[in-house]
Image: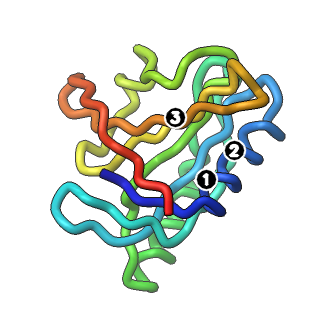
Amino acid sequence: MITITAEQKKKMEEQALKGGSGESCGILAGKKKGKCSLVSLVIPMTNVSDDPEHCYMMDPKEQLKTLKKLREKGLEMVGIYHSHPFSEAMPSKKDVELAFYSDVSYVIISLSDKRTPEMRAFRITDGKITEEGINIE
């Protein structure tokens, strides 16, 4: 279970909508308690993928710099989010291949209906996808 605020949800959705036909992405920072995570910060990242309409790739330097700052603040990466501009909020084959962190939530925002974006969260471990709940406060 991952817990985010309504304001954080809105921030992710707005970033996704501004991304147009490209996937937006970012890091969710906070604290973990077992398999539950409480998000403190939503940190938009730059998508440097060669094919941004079909996948995301965070800028590695930006990602490392962000993770270092989180550690300094006593926070950790509890999730990674990205958008699917045209498809459902379900991990794609590429998303599963790029799921390098088995201990974080993968949040996907579907923009297939731009008026009502759909947000779902998953754990991806060794290629196995398990949906988890999102608690919005």
Would you identify the image quadrant in which residue 132 lies? top left
Q: Where does label 3 land, which residue?
A: 108
Circles 2 and 1: CB atoms closer than 8 Å:
yes
Q: Which amino acid, mark 1? A: Lys
Q: Mark 1 or mark 3, which has the lower sequence index?
A: 1
Where is residue 74? Give x, y as percent: 37, 83
For label 2, the SS is: helix
The crowding category of the residue bearing disc 1, from other C-alpha atoms within 10 Å (few below 14, some 14 to 19, many at least 20), is some
- The residues tagged by marks 2 and 1 sit, at their Cα atoms, a distance apart of 6 Å
Element on which disc 3 rests = strand
CA separation in Å, label 3 and label 2 = 10 Å
Looking at the image, residue 132 sits to the left or right of residue 86; the answer is: left
Classify residue 40 as left or right of residue 123: right
Disc 2 residue crowd, few under 14, some 14–19, many 20+, Cα 10 Å: many
Q: Which disc, if any, is residue 21? A: none
Q: How many circles with numbers are drawn on the protein?
A: 3
Residue that mark 1 sits on:
9
- Where is mark 2, residue-wise? 13
Q: Nearer the viewer, residue 130 or 115?
A: 115
Whole-Å distance between the Cαs marked 1 and 3?
11 Å
The disc labelled 3 sits on which kind of residue? Ile
